[in-house]
Image: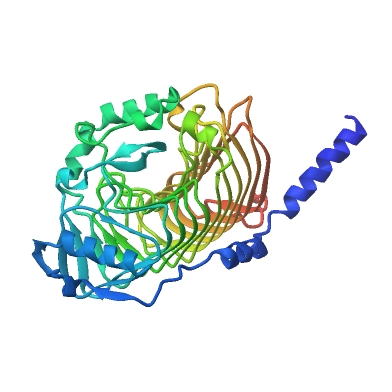
Amino acid sequence: MNFKYFFLIFLSWASFAQNSNFPSAKVDSIVKRIQLPIITSYRINVLTLGAKGDSITDNKKAFDKAMALCKKNKGGTIIVPKGIYKINGPIHFVSNVNLRIEKGAKIKFSDNPKDYLPMVLTSWEGTMLYNYSPLIYANNCTNISISGEGTIDGEGGKTWKTFKAKENEGKNRSREMNHNNTPLEERKFGEGYFLRPQMIQFLNCKNILVENIRIENSPFWCLHLLKSESITIRGISYKSLNHNNDGIDPEYAKDVLIENVTFDNGDDNVAIKAGRDHEGRANAATPSENIVIRNCNFKGLHGVVIGSEMSAGVQNVFVENCKTAGYLKRGIYLKTNADRGGYIKNIFVQNIQLDQVEDCLYITSNYHGEGKGYQSDISNVYFSNITCNKASESGIVIQGFADKKIKNISLKNIEIKEAKNALSNENAENVLMTDVFIGKRATVPTAVSKH
């Protein structure tokens, strides 16, 4: 080997090894620049506008009026006191507003799809389009907050649940439009296409706080952070077990703090996304980046997922001090395929306690074995101080392509006490393992027995 070439490889390898420590200073700088919303002093109680928390009355007009008054007053706090408030249709935010749902208060949305028309600009599994309005929706807003110790119920388990079996035509049409670069104004869905709306979606928003509320029974994804930045999600809890009930989906999102969240979801707890296929790659200037996830309790399908829609790229993700409160299929899951392109890089995960999982740590470039022509770059992934009691399938899985290897994976202080398959590592280079134990930890070698 050419000495100069060897020296360069050695230098890059040495710098990779040194970078494997969790970069707390980088986390601190992200958290420091995230701004909490500034809300004006105006306050309005929905009861004064005729709302009734009797679980029967439709309160749509009262909530719309409260939002209009806030707009007139350049912002304010909408107070929802104790009671069950049925709303037949969406809440559309304006800037500088805090929706405060107090302890003992529940907002219960109708499940009549017609209530969520006219259609709004939104996204569905990585493709921008017009569809039913999300139940709570903000577009181009600054300084917005949902707070209080109350509950938002999306009533997703009846009518909306039936949409899942009928969504394929709409889903496939949306993907064809993505691949064919169909103009956005022609991407009309809504009635007849059965694409369920998200429960809460922030689109093109900035300075967002969602704090202490409880989210239940969403029709689709629970909390979608789309093309938004400077976001704090903290202290919220979930019980949302319908189809595709991801807890939090940052997509083309930047500067996000997710902390002290108690998940209980029918799908991924946090799924970081960045658009799908051609449309996602065209948005490479707005990757999902600078996302901090810490002090959370995971319960659901997967803990933290990156992908599979990640075509604009995902970078600078920091996960620490989280544990499971129940079974997960996979603990940390990075997934992409050869339709996506883009990259996943600079992912740091430390101090994670998992109980029982199917697979503990899973990185794949070949999700569902789909696609061709656009393999993703996965590099610089650092796992440290992770424990798991039992993996019913695999402890650690890394799957790249022969012509597009996964690069620079660091595994440090990993203990998986029991696993059916310990390690599957293919088409990856620079996989560095330090103090990795899968199965029973070996002690000193036994001596030769005497005859």
Q: Which quadrant, please, contains the N terminus?
A: top right
**For this view, does 347 lie left or right of residue 141?**
right
Q: Position of residue 344 (x, y in %)?
A: 58, 42
Residue reaching furthest to the front: 72
- Where residue 316 appears, as percent x and y from the top left, is 60, 51
Against 61, residue 342 (above or below) is: above
Residue 185 in sight from this viewpoint: yes
- Left or right side of 17 for 212: left
- Image check: 98 left or right of 278? left
**Between 380 and 83, the one nearer to me in the picture:** 83
Name the residue located 21 percent from the left edge and 50 percent from the top edge: 156
Q: Nearer the viewer, residue 246 or 98?
A: 98
Q: Quadrant of residue 3?
A: top right
Residue at coordinates 28% horizontally, 67% vertically from top-left?
A: 69
Quadrant location of residue 83?
bottom left
Instruction: Look at 38% across and 28% down and name the residue there.
Output: 175
Looking at the picture, how far across and down is residue 248, in whole percent? 40, 53
Residue depicted at 15% across the width and 61% down the height: 86
